[in-house]
Image (tube, rainbow, N blue to C red):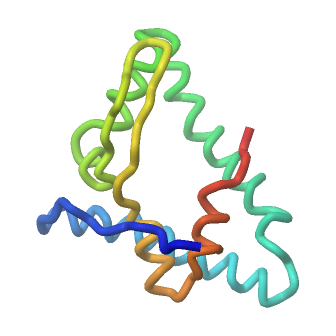
């Protein structure tokens, strides 16, 4: 497997601090998953369901706001503007009421996992679960 590219292009003191917040969250997530694996529990037995539940919990309010306004255009504006867009170096390819196509060019969560010794295979598995 080729290595997962994840080099930040944008830099700055405030941006690095914001990324550090995401990295901290990712560190404890990785360590929890690693401890589960050490005890014989594979991630795919529970992690996708937990991540999906979290996404639903946080996504419902965004979806309600998007439905009440301009659909995915509103969702894109809420999620991918300002600091959030810069932290993940998001490129919005297309955005209207019915389609939101984005590319994440950097991920601080991947960066944190690498620092803790996660393999590219584990990182790829963690970001490619079929959640729907």
**35 shown above or below 33:** below
- The number of discs equals 0
- Which residue appears at 81% of the width and 62% of the height? 46
- In this picture, residue 128 sits left or right of residue 13: right
| Image location of residue 95, percent across then percent down | 37, 22
Quarter of the figure with residue 58: top right
- In this picture, residue 60 sits left or right of residue 101: right
**84 shown above or below 96:** below
| Image location of residue 5, percent across then percent down | 40, 67
- In this picture, residue 14 sits left or right of residue 115: left
- In this picture, residue 65 sits left or right of residue 87: right
Quadrant of the drawing holding the N terminus: bottom right
Observer-nearest residue: 49 or 92?
Answer: 92
Going by the picture, which residue comes out furthest to the left? 12
Quadrant of the drawing holding the C terminus: top right
- Which residue appears at 15% of the width and 65% of the height? 11
- Which residue appears at 12% of the width and 65% of the height? 12
């Amino acid at each position: 497997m080729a290595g997962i590219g994840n080099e930040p292009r944008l830099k700055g003191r405030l941006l690095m601090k914001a990324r550090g917040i995401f990295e901290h969250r990712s560190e404890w997530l990785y360590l929890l998953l690693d401890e589960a694996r050490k005890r014989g529990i594979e991630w795919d037995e529970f992690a996708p369901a937990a991540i999906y539940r979290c996404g639903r919990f946080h996504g419902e309010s965004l979806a309600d706001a998007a439905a009440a306004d301009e659909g995915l255009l509103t969702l894109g504006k809420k999620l991918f503007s300002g600091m959030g867009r810069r932290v993940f170096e998001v490129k919005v390819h297309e955005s209207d009421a019915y389609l939101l196509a984005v590319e994440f060019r950097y991920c601080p969560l991947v960066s944190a996992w690498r620092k803790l010794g996660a393999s590219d295979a584990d990182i790829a598995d963690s970001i490619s679960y079929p959640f729907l």
